[in-house]
Image (spheres, helix red, strand yellow):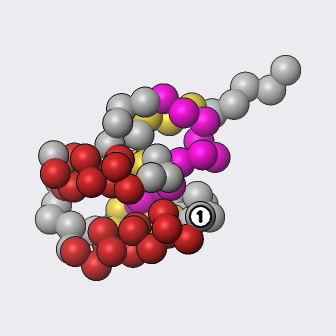
Amino acid sequence: MKKIPQRTCVGCNEIKPKKELIRIVKNKLGEISVDVTSKKEGRGAYLCDNIECLDKAIKTKRLERIFETKIDDDIYQNLRGVISDK
């Protein structure tokens, strides 16, 4: 039986299958983007596919602590778009 990769959501701290989560990635140049294919290179963080988890992550500045950098509002807006599209 094949093992299913598990990741932790940065919003709610729940462990879920990797395919159910949205990946946010920081590449070597320090650029942060939403990785819909889950194949981009760089440090990744995962977020549940709901607005509540995104709001928690924004409120606690969890993504900023993980990536050790300030995150622009357009990244958060892009994430809101990806979440509402699904």
Task: Give the residue drawn at x 48%, y 29%.
Answer: 15
Magenta-tinted stretch: 15-25
Q: Where does the image place residue 73, in percent across and percent down from the top left?
A: 22, 74
The answer to whether residue 71 is visible is yes
Report the quarter where the C terminus lies. bottom right
Does the magenta segment cover residue 19? yes
Please tell me which residue lies in front, 84 or 41: 84
**Residue to which mark 1 is pinned:** 86
Quarter occupied by residue 55: bottom left
Q: Is 66 in front, or is 41? A: 66
Determine which quarter of the picture holds residue 14.
top left
62 on left or right of 84: left
- Amino acid type at circle 1 is Lys
Is residue 86 depicted above or below 63 in this figure? Answer: below
The x and y percentages for residue 71 are 21, 67
Quarter of the image with the N terminus is top right
Element carrying mark 1? loop
Q: Does the segment drawn in magenta span residue 49?
A: no
Neighbour tally class for label 1: few under 14, some 14-19, many 20 plus, Cα within 10 Å: few
Count of marks placed on residues:
1
Left or right, residue 56 beside residue 69: right
Q: Can residue 63 be seen in this view?
A: no
Residue under the point 45% across and 74% down: 81
